[in-house]
Structures are given as C-alpha cells and as structure tokens.
Amino acid sequence: MATLEIRDLHVSVETKEGAKPILRGVDLTVNSGETHAIMGPNGSGKSTLAYSIAGHPKYQITSGTVTLDGEDVLALSVDERARAGLFLAMQYPVEVPGVSVSNFLRTAKTAIDGEAPALRTWVKDVRTAMDNLRMDPAFADRSVNEGFSGGEKKRHEILQMELLKPRFAILDETDSGLDVDALRVVSEGVNRVRSNSDVGVLLITHYTRILRYIQPDFVHVFVDGKVAEEGGPELAERLENEGYDRFLTSAV
Ligand SMILES: Nc1ncnc2c1ncn2[C@@H]1O[C@H](COP(=O)(O)OP(=O)(O)OP(=O)(O)O)[C@@H](O)[C@H]1O
Ligand SMILES: [Mg+2]
C-alpha cells in the first residue's frame, strides 16, 4: 500500500502583477485503493492543486509538502514524478502535433517502466484498451489530441491511465463535456483500472453524475484554495442540492 500525502500546501501562480497566492493550506491524504472526489466552485484552485502535484512550472510552491510514501515529490522533476507513479489527466489536454497517439503511448510507457514494452503484448494491450474505450483504431495514427473533440480528448486521457497503470491518478474534470454514453465508457475505464490495480484516485468534478458510476470513498469540498469540508458520498448529493453558498458566506 502507498500513501500520497499533501500537508499545508501553499501555492502561488506567476502573474504580470507578481506572485498570486491560490492554494492556502491544503491538507489531503490519499491511500492506495481509495477514491477521493474533490468538488468546489470555479476558481477555487482545484486544477492548481492537480498541476502542483504533477509539477507544472507555472506554479510556485511557497510552503508545505507533498510526499509519496514519505518521499518528497516536490523535489522530483515532472518525469521523475511520472516514474514514481503519479498520473494527471488534464482538464484541458494539450495538442501535440506531429506525435502520433501510438508513438506517444509507447514512449510514455517505455519512459515510465524504464524499458520498452514487449511489442506483441503491447500492440494487443493498446488495441484492447482502445476497444474498451470505444475509440476507433484510426486514432492510433493521429497526432495527440490534434483536432480531437472534447470527449475524444478525455477518452485519450483514460486510455493513457489504462496503459500506464499509475499508482495515483488525478483526474481533472474528466467528465466535463462528455455525452451520456461517453461518460459511462470513461467511467468504466476508470473502474477497470481501479479493479485491476491498487490505484488511488483523486477525482476533480463538478457533477454528482460521474460519482454514481465511480463511487468515491471520500468527498472534499474545495473553497478558496483549501479543503473546507470532508465527508462521504452523501456530501456530494448535498452539494448538488444546496450549492456552495454556505461555504462562500463563511469564507467572507
Ligand atoms: N496566470 C494566472 N494569472 C492570474 N490568475 C491565475 C493564473 N492562473 C490561475 N489563476 C487563478 O487561480 C485561480 C484558481 O484556478 P484553478 O484553475 O485552479 O481553479 P479551478 O478550481 O480548477 O476552477 P474550475 O472549476 O473553473 O476548473 C483562478 O481564480 C484563476 O483565475
Ligand atoms: Mg479546474
């Protein structure tokens, strides 16, 4: 079992007017096999948390710690973090013109495992994973995310998760912009990884609908750069009915 631990994390973002504090003391512990949902209003810092854990250079850690089994994640480069088993499915996946999906996946797998995957099983694994996610095999030859629809980009993120088998996966609004069928297909993908491995999942979402497919063990309400309340799945239902009003008034 592994533990991803975030302690009193403060993060600023570089702006033209100087450093702007976004995260103001985030505490969060995710163990292997657990699924944590993070919900919260727009601009509360959810993606900032995701990027900070993944190591995006735009975000400056001003204090606090992120550790994986006691190891200092913040001291690692982005690719070292990936090799340590951290995975981020981005809210807005970036296009990589000129790099095909199949090349990208194989390169990522090789970098993370430290050796190239055996060709025969790999080709089969990719085909099966694409099949499961109802992705046309033609996507393998297309440039990463170039011209992909919103939903296709999200499927491609989960395809990576299935093939790279991370220890901890952060899914930033993977459900946004999906039609009903795609939501089910993507959720099934996440659930496959959950049942085939001991992955710990941090699921950032605005909607309880995905939480009916992907049952969270814990729900955290993120407000103004930190966790304002924690509970079980029932907390998500309550937020759906009541919104964030009671947190926003208390924050003022
Ligand atoms: N370069 C920047 N300049 C100024 N403000 C920034 C910059 N980058 C991020 N921010 C601000 O940081 C805050 C947190 O943004 P973040 O993307 O983490 O929010 P979020 O909780 O993911 O929101 P959403 O639910 O809309 O995805 C926002 O108010 C955003 O405008
Ligand atoms: Mg966001």
Image (tube, rainbow, N blue to C red):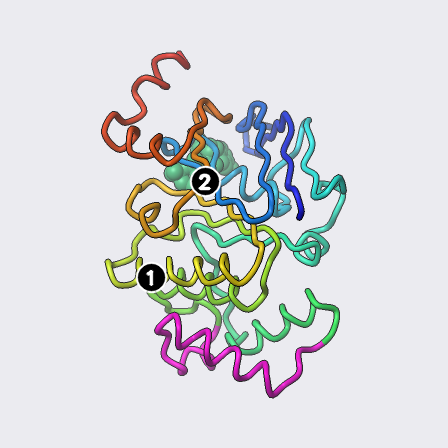
- Estimate the x, y position of residue 126 in percent, counting from the top left: 51, 78
> From the viewer's perspective, is 98 left or right of 110?
left
> From the viewer's perspective, is 151 left or right of 219?
left
| Total numbered badges shown on the rendered structure | 2
Is residue 133 a member of the stretch shown in magenta?
yes
The residue positioned 59% from the left and 65% from the top of the image is: 164
Q: Quadrant of residue 217?
A: top left
Secondary structure of the residue carrying numbered label 2 = loop
Quadrant assignment for ligand 2 = top left
Sequence-earlier tag: 2 or 1: 1
Residue wearing tag 2: 217
Crowd tier of the residue under label 1, counting other residues whose Cα lies within 10 Å: few below 14, some 14–19, many 20 or above: some
The residue positioned 45% from the left and 45% from the top of the image is: 203
- Estimate the x, y position of residue 98 in percent, counting from the top left: 53, 75
Stretch in magenta: 116-143
Query: Alpha carbon of mark 2 to alpha carbon of mark 1: how far?
Result: 26 Å
- Estimate the x, y position of residue 114 in percent, counting from the top left: 75, 69
Between 182 and 100, the one nearer to me in the picture: 182
